[in-house]
Every structure is written in C-alpha cells, then in structure tokens.
Image (cartoon, grey):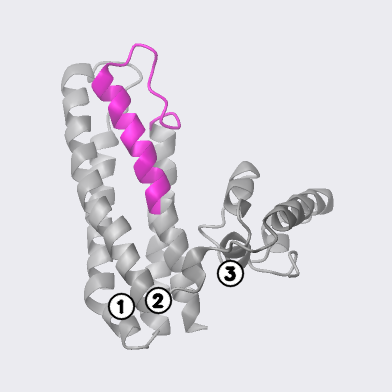
Amino acid sequence: MNISQSTVSELVAKIPGASELFDAYQIDYHLAPALTLKDLTGEGKSRLTEIIGKLNTLAKEAELQQPNPWLNASTYELIAHILEHYHDKHKEQFPELIRLCHKVQLFHHDHPKFPSRLEAHLSAMFFELQEHMAKEEQILFPLMLEGLFPYGPISVMEEEHIDHARALEQLADMTNNFTAPSDACQTWTELYAKAKILHQDLFEHIHLENNILFRRSQ
C-alpha cells in the first residue's frame, strides 16, 4: 500500500487509527476524501514524512488484518446499518438536543458563556439533515440496492456532506469544543455531552457514506 499516493478515504478505511491521527494533525478527511495525503499536507515535506511514518506504524501494528468491517459488507448490509445506526439515531438526537438547549436557554439566557444562537443552529442543522436523509432514503439508496450508483445524485450528497461537516465545526466552536463552563448546571452539561456524541456520530456517518458506500460507484 503506497501511503503517500493513497487517498485519505482509503487510508481511513484500511488503517485502524488513521482517522484519529488525521484529527490530531487537523487534516480534514471528511471534506476532501478523494485527495491524497500529499495534497492535504501541502508543501511541508517534513510534516508529510512524519505523518507517513506514523501511518506505517499503525499499519504494521494492525498488520492490516482488521480493516474496516464495512469494506466487505454487502450494499444491503451497509445501507441497513446506516439507516439504523445513523439516520434513525439522528432523528432522535436532534429533538433531544433542541429540547435541552431550550431548557438551558430559558434559565441561563443571560449567562455570558451561553451561545444564544445554539438552538437556532441545531434547528437549522436538523432541517437540512432531514432533507438530506429523505433524498437518500427515497431516491439514492433504492437505486444502490438495485446495483446503480448514479454519479449525479452521489455528487449532490457529497456536496451536502460538506455543508453538514461545516455546521458540525460551527457547533464545536459555539460550545467551546463541547466544554461547559465550571458553573454550568446539570442540564447544560448534559446538553454539551450529547452534542459531542452527535458530532462524532454524524462525522462517522459522513465518513461511512463518502469513503466506503459512495466509492463503490468507482
């Protein structure tokens, strides 16, 4: 496996721990899955060499014997997993976050560290994600289950994933990386803890579609 020439989606899918390493180096593999590691690290040769070395270590430790289990799953199994573990879950996560946010804002709207636009941001994210998931459930996934992987609809989904990823980054910024202030109440702390879980789940959702499911069209 040529690490420097592989796309970041291939590296994340095949090397356990690669996603955590990219996060540590602030390499955004969510937004540019088709680019190579060299593309994303720019001209910094020493930085590229350092990252490749660490990826090689990860690959050797795992001996590539435990690749992402969804690489070899059937399209039916993969879509069923996405629907159950991400689509259905997000439809429960967002209303709960919005409920908690409304409750915190009711009592702490004047707190200097409470993000006044958080509820509106969560509501907008949920609206956009519902529209996105509906298109997948009603149009794209049925086509894929028939063995069709249309470039146009997949490209649209990938573009929308970029918007979702940016909204997640804004969510992290608004919540001080999901860190509640020291004097936060229990509900506020719970809100940020559940928002952090959503952040991780939705990025995993995007990765699974962009880097594994959608790549089956190539």
- x, y percentage for residue 87? 27, 59
Number of other residues with Cα within 10 Å of mark 2, as a class: few under 14, some 14 to 19, many 20 or more: some
Query: What residue lies at 29% left-to-right and 27% top-to-bottom?
Result: 190
Residue assigned mark 3:
34
Mark 2: amino acid: Ile
What kind of residue is marked 3?
A: Ala
Residue at the spot 41% in from the left edge and 31% down from the top edge: 178
Q: Mark 2 falls on what kind of element?
A: helix
The answer to whether marks 1 and 2 mark residues whose Cβ atoms lie closer than 8 Å is: yes
How far apart are the two marked residues, 1 and 2, measured between alpha carbons? 8 Å
Above-or-below relation of 120 to 106? below
Question: Which residue does the image show at 75% across and 52% down from the upper left?
Answer: 57
Quadrant for residue 136, please give it: bottom left
Which stretch is magenta?
175-202
How far apart marks 3 and 1 lie (CA) works out to: 20 Å
Quadrant of the rendered structure where residue 81 is? bottom left
Say which residue label 2 marks.
154
Near-viewer residue (168 or 8) = 8
Residue 22 horizontal side relative to residue 46, left or right: left
